[in-house]
Image (cartoon, rainbow, N blue to C red):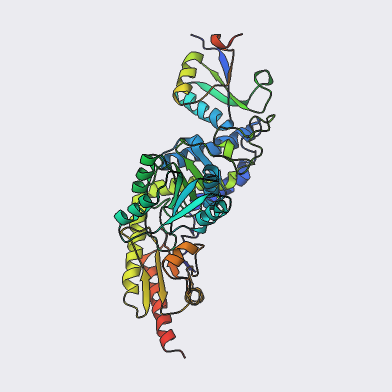
Amino acid sequence: MIYFDNSATTYPKPDSVASAVYHAVKSLGGNPGRSGHKMSVKAAGAVYSVRESVAELFGAQPENVIFTLNCTHALNLAIKGILGSGDHVIISTLEHNAVARPVHALKEQGTEVSIAPVYDTDDETVKAFEKLVRKNTKAVVCTGASNVTGRLMPIKRIAKLCESRGIVFICDGAQTAGVVDMKVGDGINFICTAGHKGLYGTTGTGVLVSDGKYKLSTIIEGGTGTTSLELSQPDDLPERLESGTVNTVGIMGLGQGVAFVRRMGIENIHRKENALCLRFINGLKRIDGVRIYRQGEHFVPIVAFNVDNFHSSEVTDYLSEQGFALRGGYHCAALAHEFYQTTENGVVRFSPSVFNTPGQVDLLLQSIKKFAKLSKNPL
Amino acid sequence: MNDTGFIFSLSSVTYAIKAQSILRKNGYRCEVIKTPKDMGKSCGYSIRAYGDRMKARVLLSKQGIDIKSAKPPFEEDRI
């Protein structure tokens, strides 16, 4: 199988990630932050070292890195930790359901919600956010890049706008981490991301990174290994938001994933994957009946397309039979598909990783060409 | 200069390891321990370190690390 579904989760993982996971299972058996014996302290030290690596990647302090189950978990902690009844929040029309659904749930409890459209230019898009700001706007939550089309949002400019108005800015970095250099600060108060996508960790890992400016209310409380005789949740990060035992094994894998990204260099990774996308787009343009969805000025390495009027799942089913893994359907992004008017057929999403090659892209293009031809001249 | 051992209790294991990291980088011999019961009833972590206690306090304070209590206590904390 040639894997082009890296926006869902990257595969393969670097060997160093697999080794770290194995090592953690074999050698880091203590519960980090719970006991005083050497095994526990050793595990806590190992977890802290990954906290430091992630903090450096996102320009944060180690204690402001919260390990989560995934990006959705991180977004829920941030969104529901900031917003309450009577507050107003602005999101973009490209949001994944990881943002759209928590915000929708808050709307039913009295939070006001506005959805900013996106335009061809970043200028128009930033203005769209600005127009929606109200006196009670508490937060803007915006994806770093669309998980459907790869469109990169003008995050730094939206963050600046928020900072100038005293609005909390939460960025969904699921598709940007590892391919775009993004740091907290300068108006970016929270970055939420997965550990298992562009950071090459294992599934079951995510991070919430804070600039430390805003305190989040909790949506989960429990044991933190601190102030155990008190019933109120402690104030200090990361424990405040990390109730229950953390995923030591996954965190160790994530640590090596982050190290891999730093060794490769984010710019180099983006350049390589973007070159694969451009090669793919150029090939698609030569196939009759293919429509490419590409709106905006800048992109992360994702290409969305359809073939004639086929449902995207028919295309991906065919490609799977031919040995290629791509995702069709709706990508958990209702708002984006409504915006791009693709709710009928969804789209096929191509998302390479640093492990893919130009030759693999060419093989995929041959199969798409074959599908397009067969569909016009069925046997 | 006081270069006998001292204990600082901290708010969490994260801060204890951060403190340990800072002090080790500054030449201290240091380890993370559970907070001794005479320094706090609740679960918690501390560092036991050897070297200049006053300088250690300044180093940690500069990094935003709040020392909950110290053993032996600082002069201003004595009742």
Above-or-below relation of A372 to A264: below
Q: Is residue A360 left or right of residue A193?
A: left
The residue under the point 39% across, 60% down is A150
Above-or-below relation of A96 to B40: below
Q: Position of residue A2 (x, y in %)?
A: 46, 68
Q: Quadrant of residue A357?
A: bottom left
Observer able to see residue A202: no
Q: Position of residue A170 (x, y in %)?
A: 45, 46
Q: Nearer the viewer, residue A321 or A293?
A: A293
Above-or-below relation of A85 to A197: above
Q: How many marks?
A: 0
Q: Position of residue A69 (x, y in %)?
A: 57, 49
Q: Position of residue A307 (x, y in %)?
A: 41, 77
Q: Is residue A360 left or right of residue A85?
A: left
Observer able to see residue A277: yes
Q: Quadrant of residue A272?
A: bottom left
Q: Nearer the viewer, residue A165 or B48?
A: A165
